[in-house]
Image (cartoon, helix red, strand yellow):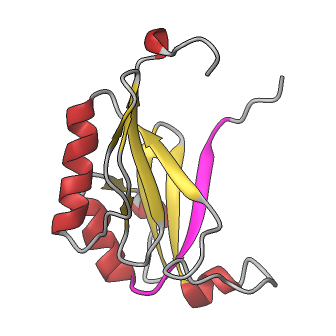
Amino acid sequence: MTRTTGLFVNLPISDVARTRAFYTALGFEINEAFSNDKAVAVILGEHQFAMLLQRDFFRTFTQLEIADPTKSVQCLVAIQFDTKGEVDAVVETALANGGGEPHPPEDMGFMYQRAFSDPDGHGWGPFWMDPAGIPEGH
C-alpha cells in the first residue's frame, strides 16, 4: 500500500497579509521557514500544511488557468477535529474574521460537519467523526 509522509495543499490567494491574519485568528500556527511576502505556510497538523501562495507566485507552478474559487470549485479541503465543539469554534471564528458559511451544519450522528470559505473563497470542511459509530453500509 502506498502511503505519504506529509501533505501540502497549495492554494492561490490574493493578499498574503490578510490570509496570514485569517488563519492565525483560527488558531493555526504559521511555519515561518516556508512563509514570506509571497506565501504563508499554515500548519494543519503533523506533516500537514496549507501552502497559501500569492496568485502570481502560484502561477509559476502551473501552465493551467487558475480558477476563481468564488465562482467555481476544484477541491474542498476536509479537516478533522476531535470534537463537535472544535468544529463549531473554528467555523464561528472563520465567520468572525471574514469567512463565509456556504451551507448549514450537517449532523449524521456518527459524523458532524460544517463548512467555511476563507476570504479568497476556498472551501474548508471541518468535521468530527466517531468511527465506531459509522452505520453499516457507509
Judge by depth and name the residue closer to the eye, 38 or 65. 65
Q: What residue is shown at x 50% (from left), y 16% (from top)?
A: 134
Check residue 115 for magenta coloring: no
Quadrant of residue 102 in the image? bottom left
Q: Which residues are magenta?
A: 5-15
Judge by depth and name the residue closer to the eye, 40 or 120. 120
Relative to 65, residue 118 above or below: above
Relative to 38, residue 87 above or below: above
Q: Residue 63, percent across and down?
A: 81, 84
Judge by depth and name the residue closer to the eye, 52 or 71. 71
Q: Quadrant of the C terminus?
A: top right
Q: Residue 50, percent across and down?
A: 50, 58
In this rendering, position of residue 59 left or right of residue 1: left
Q: Main secondary structure of the magenta part?
A: strand
In this rendering, position of residue 84 left or right of residue 110: left
Q: Residue 15, percent across and down?
A: 39, 85
In this rendering, position of residue 10 left or right of residue 88: right
Q: What residue is shown at x 62% (from left), y 41% (from top)?
A: 6
Q: Residue 94, percent across and down?
A: 25, 62
